[in-house]
Amino acid sequence: LPVLDPAERELLLGEWISTGQAAVTVPEQGSDRGSVPGSGVAAPGGSGVTVAGLLGERLSVGGDAPAVVGAGGELSFSQLGAAVFRLARVLIAHGAGPERVVAVVVPRSESMVVAMAAVLVSGAAYVPMDPEHPAERLGVMLADADPVVVVTVSSVAPRLPGAVAGRLLVLDDPVVVAEVDAASPEPVVDEDRLCAARPQHPAYLVFTSGSTGRPKGVLMPGTGLVNLLTWHRANLPGGPGTRTAQFTAVTFDFSVQEIFATLVSGGCLVVPSDDTRKDGTAMVRWLDHHRVGQLYGPTLTIEAIFESARELGSDLASLTDVFQGGQAFTISDPAREFYAAGPGRRAHNIYGPAETHMVTTFSVDGDARGWPSELPIGRPIGGTRLYVLDGGLGLAPPGAPGELYVAGAVLARGYAGRFALTAERFVADPFGPAGSRMYRTGDVVRWRADGVLEYLGRADDQVKIRGFRVEPGEVAAVVAAHPAVGQAVVVPWRSATGDTHLIAYTVPADRDDDHDGDGRTTAGDDRPGRDGGFDPRAVRDFVRGRLPDFMVPSAVVVVERLPLTPNGKLDRAALPAPRWEGGGGRAPRTPREEVLCRLFARVLRVERVSVDDSFFDLGGHSLLATRLISEIREELRAELPIRHLFEAPTVAELAERLDQGGEVQLALGRRERPERVPLSFAQR
């Protein structure tokens, strides 16, 4: 029976679901359909603003204003435009163009930004890939994407699979450098491309975790990206003179908005090194040094920066706008201190799955003491239609929970090469024009009385780990591929530190009796089993060689059998709780080791730590590593690069690094800081 009266129905299908006009007007489905390689979805016809045109226009008129700043120097918009147009012409000569894909596997730098922009100007879609990801995973994604060109550099090329060797464009190869230098720096137009660029041609392809054990590629058309960029330019802070950090991982779809909304709005993109990104203290100093005004990132990562700023006594004076996405936006004490430290600071909660882009936003400013502890995901942006539906695809009343469905100009075409999965997640829109589709997000939300959406959780097993969307099934499939593993499941676990960890529960293939089966986490146990049996540490190393760091289980728990419910399903409640146990090795031998053992235990929330325990085997990860480095700075008055912890993760190894010196320098106390610090050459 319908529970909505006509006025409520009109509200839910009118004023609330779409608060603005689409930035580009194109039919969602048209009669003039072209083929869409790999997606199983037809491309509608039409004409209008293209991504190549939008970006090319800004690069042509930007002038001498700074566009990109990195370790290699600064590029003005005119210099960036010349570099992009030259490289775009070379890409076209190598086969890049509309309805084709180009992979970009370049370390974080100005060259990475140039390469991504050049692909879009050529009319092709770019696939961002992290050179630090395991070679096997890069190979799987390259095989799925099937790019016509792979843009890379000489330091990365040897790690790429041989199957793409003939398609490599190595930017620092002398032959390629000469080819790019010889190309015209004039703007690229349709006559220069393989065919005319149209709004519906693909703009980018990003990979997300897949429940079947294989990542899935989301193919976004230009209509969605143009809608995002033009809406952002008109409705969110930024513009000429604004300096934005290129902080998010390029494999995270949030980076698309971060990079191209900045450039299209005439702002300046400032690119930190990977070492700086991973170190909260270094990042705070970098933000201050470069006078960065805008920062994008997941909540936990941003909070780590705020904590580091508090410890350093920095109020991040230039930072005015923080855009957080990928996780629930909670306001911690360091965050409140940051927002209250100066006038004009704003927090923006950005929501949108990779299969769309940003579809809602909620911004707050003013007195941070009155902000709620968790921000809602907000109202829809222009060009979207949002529905909160019950299990029968009926409209959920205001205040009632339901699953969020997204429709409009923001939809991806689907999953590249995954026809069945595309049909499962992109379904017919019963409330929109004939032939239109909507995306089933799997997120449970509800409408507030004021038309704002609140996020409640997931309708499936999907989780967010440090801002990245992870399907535990994909991780479990890789764990189960280890020859010593008979069965495996992976479940999220919230630790005492408040972080969400992935825990792998495994049944050994030989059911060796050496294993406790009591939930003791044996990820750091290097004792071989009987006859060289099951080694949980080897399982984690096996997974680490195939998946990105954030997808590697924090622990491998050995059980005799997986508990089942009477219906034969996994009984999650019966799984033993993981217990990260340290202290089983040698005791500290020096005062420095004693302090490090205490700091390890405090950060990891374990009772004790021996000098032989690995920080990462006890549940540590990159964000906790930042906290540990801060604790070491305060206790030992030593400045330790965060990479030292990754290279020497035990107390004994880290103490040896501190004893040896090397790059470790004594940190100045705050009172010892000179009253006036001379400007660097770049600052002058």
Image: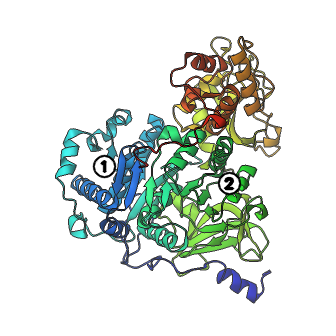
Note whether residue 97 is visible. no
- Mark 1 vs mark 2, foreground winner is 2
Element marked by disc 1: strand
Q: What is the residue that sits farthest to the bottom in this orientation?
A: 6
Using the rendered view, name the quadrant where residue 324 is placed: bottom right
The N terminus: image quadrant = bottom right
Element marked by disc 2: helix
Q: Residue at x 74, y 41 (%)?
A: 493
Using the rendered view, name the quadrant where residue 19 is placed: bottom right
426 in relation to 94, above or below: below
599 in relation to 287, above or below: above
Residue 1 - label: none
Mark 1 and mark 2: span between their CA atoms? 44 Å
Q: Which residue is mark 2?
A: 338
579 in relation to 383, above or below: above
153 sits to left or right of 447: left
Note whether residue 183 is visible. yes
For the residue pair 529 and 368, the one nearer the viewer reads as 368
For the residue pair 440 and 76, the one nearer the viewer reads as 76
Protein image colouring? rainbow
Q: Who comes first in sequence, dot 1 or dot 2?
A: 1
Q: Residue at x 74, y 69 (%)?
A: 446
61 in relation to 136, above or below: below
* Residue 635 coordinates in the image, percent (x, y): 71, 28
Residue 149 - label: 1
Disc 1 residue type?
Val
Q: Residue at x 63, y 65 (%)?
A: 344
Q: Are marks 1 and 2 in contact (CB under 8 Å)?
A: no
Q: Residue at x 40, y 47 (%)?
A: 682
Q: Few, some or many C-alpha atoms within 10 Å of disc 2 (few <14, some 14-19, many ≥20)? A: many
